């Protein structure tokens, strides 16, 4: 798969797989950002990409990002194929859950992108599902 990509700052590397078995490419902070305690901030990721039609980009933090005191505000981000204008730089919305200011340095690996095929759904509305009830949230037990 070939993906068109534009870097805002060409001194920062292109997203890349870090190991042969990696499923996601790491993304880099495009600027220095300070995130105040218990506040939200946006970290520019230095890229605009054209996700191919029929695919979706799943934006997530790296597994080590929490060690900085940051977590994503919206869990994951969804990148649509039509979010690719010249000014559509990807951003990572993070929340600082610590009592200290967190400094994100330009060029650190902060997020990752996973590109997956996607299907469009059509609704088939019914009056009954015709299946047995499972018993609610957490119904399969505690173990």
Image (tube, rainbow, N blue to C red):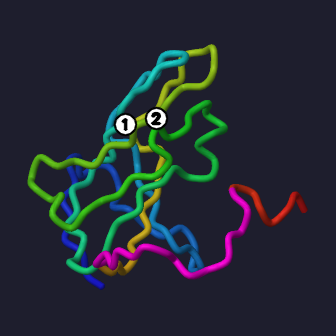
- Please say whether residue 1 is one of the residues in the magenta stretch: no
Q: Residue at x 33, y 79 (%)?
A: 124
User: Among all residues in the image, which is located at the extreme front?
Assistant: 127
- Residue 75's place in the image compared with 3, above or below, is above
Observer able to see residue 54: yes
- Rendering coords of residue 118 (x, y %): 35, 78
Residue range of the region highlighted in magenta in the rendering: 121-136
Name, please, the residue furthest toward the bottom: 1
Res 91 → quadrant: top left
Image quarter of the C terminus: bottom right
Give the label on residue 43, or none.
1
Horizontal and vertical percent position of residue 54:
26, 80
Q: Which residue is disc 2 drawn over?
A: 94
Asked if labels 2 and 1 touch by Cβ distance under 8 angstroms, the answer is yes
Query: Which residue is at 61% across, 80% downward?
Result: 131
Residue 100 to residue 125: above or below: above
Q: Residue at x 77, y 61 (%)?
A: 139
């Amino acid at each position: 798969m070939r993906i068109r990509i534009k870097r805002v700052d060409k001194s920062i590397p292109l997203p890349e797989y870090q190991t042969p078995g990696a499923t996601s490419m790491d993304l880099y902070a495009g600027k220095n950002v300070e995130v105040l305690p218990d506040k939200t901030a946006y970290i520019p990721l230095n890229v605009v990409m054209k996700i191919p039609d029929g695919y979706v980009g799943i934006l997530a933090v790296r597994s080590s990002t929490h060690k900085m005191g940051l977590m994503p505000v919206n869990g994951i981000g969804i990148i649509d194929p039509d979010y690719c204008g010249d000014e559509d730089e990807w951003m990572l919305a993070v929340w600082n859950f610590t009592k200290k200011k967190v400094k994100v340095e330009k060029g650190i690996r902060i997020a990752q992108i996973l590109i997956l095929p996607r299907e469009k759904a059509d609704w088939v509305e019914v009056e009954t599902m015709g299946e047995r009830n499972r018993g609610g949230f957490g119904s399969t037990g505690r173990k």
